Amino acid sequence: EPLFDKAMSNVIEVKARGASVLALTTENRREDLASRVDGILTIPETELPLLPLLLLVMAAIAIDSPGPVIFKQKRIGYQGKEFMIFKFRTLSITAPDNVATRKLENIDGCSTKLGRLLRRLSIDELPQLFNILRGDMSFVGFRPVCTSEKKLNALRRKMGVFEGRPGLTGYAQVLGRDSIGVARKARLDAEYQRKRSLRLDLWCMVKSVTVVLSGSGVM
């Protein structure tokens, strides 16, 4: 019985959006688990209204330039492990692989006609709803970067950023997007990890709308 009681002490009930889920945790991260449950339950409600837009974008990309509609790339995510991220393709098929968009020497030459608009409005990120459904990502977290961005990934590892999941949007994302430096981005990611809460996640999501509409900080 004592052994059973000890085991059951690590089982918590997480409630989100009317659903109740039993979860095993060693650190009682109730808000993090609630956020994960809420994110997964929200996806069907998010995807259905967006379905016409997704189909329209897919058709436009196929017409705009040769190559696959979906772009796949290895990124560094939860616990510093690699995962495959999905995005709408915004660059030509001749663009260099495993290079951050902002680091391309001739970004205009590498972009498709439609690509820059998709990036400015962050529409290219919508396929990451599938990453959220798979458990690779959350709606809010640090923005995962290429494996080649060794300095940022090293700083994130050192500061404990990888203890959380990457997000479709994030604290650093809404406070500067691509316009802030590597060191500040890592510090903001670490700050989010320390302050993480459902309230902060909601603030980031609301703020993301204004950032996207303004088109600020995007490369």
Image: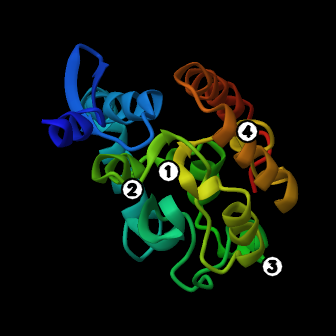
- CA distance separating discs 4 and 3: 21 Å
Mark positioned earlier in the residue sequence (2 or 3): 3
Element under disc 3: loop
**Residue type, label 1:** Arg
Q: Is mark 2 on a helix, strand or loop?
A: loop
- Coordinates of residue 109 in the picture (x, y in percent): 71, 75
Q: Which mark is residue 105?
A: 3
Question: Of callouts 4 and 3, which one flags the residue occurring earlier in the amino acid sequence?
Answer: 3
Q: 175 or 164, which is in the foreground?
A: 164
Q: In front: mark 1 or mark 3?
A: 1
Label annotation for residue 98: none
Task: Residue at 62%, 27% (x, y): give it.
Answer: 209
Callout 3, which amino acid?
Answer: Glu
Identify the residue at horizontal 29%, vertical 53% (top origin): 134
- Is residue 75 shown to the viewer in this render? yes
Q: Is residue 107 left or right of residue 31?
A: right
Please state the horizontal and vertical placement of residue 202, each as a whole percent of the image: 56, 21
SS at badge 4: loop
From the top left corner, tell me how far across and down residue 92 is, in percent: 55, 76
* Mark 3 crowdedness (10 Å alpha carbons): few <14, some 14-19, many ≥20: few
- Which label is found at residue 165? 1
Q: 10 Å neighbourhood of mark 2: few (<14), some, or many (≥20)?
A: many
- Give the residue furthest to the left: 1
The residue that mark 2 highlights is: 136
Q: Mark 4 points at which residue?
A: 215
Marks 2 and 1 in Cβ contact (< 8 Å): yes
Tag 1 or tag 2, which sits nearer the N-term? 2
Number of dots carrying numbers: 4
The quarter of the picture where the C terminus appears is: bottom right
Task: Name the kind of residue labelled 4 in the image.
Answer: Gly
